Amino acid sequence: MKYGELYEQIKKKGSFLCVGLDTDIEKIPSCVKERVRAASLPQEEAVFIFNKEIIDATVPYAIAFKINTAFYEALGSEGIRQMEKTVSYIKTNYPDIFIIADAKRGDIGNTAKQYAKAFFEKMDCDAVTLSPYMGGDAIMPFLKYEGKWAIILALTSNVTAEDFETLETRPHRMDFDDDAQTHVPLYERVLSQAEKWGNKDNVMFVVGATRPGQLARIRLLCPENFFLVPGVGVQGGRVEEVAAAGMNSHCGLIVNSSRGILYADSSERFAQAAAEKAIEMVSQMKVHLK
């Protein structure tokens, strides 16, 4: 999916909501598990059935789905099959939806090439989250795919992000035009270098919703790039703060909500409750898109 196509979906739906499919088999409503048992299916099949109903209920309001691969990999080969079925279902039934593999890969050389092949060729996701810790070698193989995106971790929403991401660094060259700035936090060095690896058409950045002050600074440094913004809802981030700090002329934001939508209800009406939560978030987004 290209930059303009993503923006068209945002305008069409009046939304920049991403629903995170962080599907924990332990949290899937018992009614779904009972259906699986009654049909004598493997217990892992509950993952796809749950995902399918969440997707169908929330797709009128979402422009993206983010699949956290850890929850599927933890179930072994059957979990991987549920993930592949989920991606295939979205691609077949809702081809205009942006699909993110939240895998946070970050390796070099042939390994990175194989990760890119897995997520972009085999699974046909639109984007994958990546760790830049090992430098450009870990990112460049993903940028060779036309219409695909590298979503690079910049400033994340977790508390211990400050262990590394905000450490002051002395650049070996001035990364930005501010001559008075002799030290920059590590995440700004990541942004600066990643801008040289790719461009607004194939590079996004992860910027946590719990850090609106830094989000505003990052928008100044990267005026055109899209940001994937986790941390709204359960983690305390707010749509209005994110929009005020990070929106650009093409919206430039994909705001993710996972647990707050997925597990809004544990009864038979779990999908309806998820849709209601999505509607609630999108109603806030529409105000800022106007």
Image: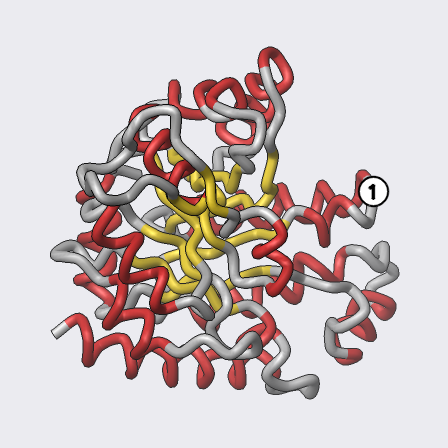
Tell me where residue 28 appears, x and y as whole percent.
73, 72
Please indicate, yes or no, whether residue 240 appears anywhere in the rendered image.
yes
Q: In which quarter of the image is the C terminus?
A: bottom left
Up-down relation of residue 201 to residue 142 (above or below): below
Residue 184: horizontal and vertical position, in percent?
38, 44
Question: Quick one: 266 or 113, which is closer to the camera?
Answer: 113
* Picture residue at 51% right of the left edge, 18% below the top: 137
Q: Is residue 264 left or right of residue 56?
A: right
In the image, 140: left or right of 68? left
Q: Quadrant of the N terminus?
A: top left
Crowding near the residue tagged with mark 1, few <14, some 14–19, many ≥20 C-alpha atoms within 10 Å = few
Residue toward you, 254 or 40 = 254
Above or below for 129 versus 20: above
Q: Determine whether the residue tagged by mark 1 lies in a helix, strand or loop.
A: loop
**For residue 52, what is the image quadrant?**
bottom right
Give the residue pinned by disc 1.
Answer: 76
Residue 158, horizontal then vertical, whole percent: 59, 62
**Left or right: where does residue 131 sit relative to residue 49?**
left
- Residue at 60%, 42% in the rendered image: 103
Amino acid type assigned to the residue bearing label 1 in the image: Gly
Q: Relative to 168, say whether 243 is above or below.
A: below
Residue 92 visible in this rendered orientation of the protein: no
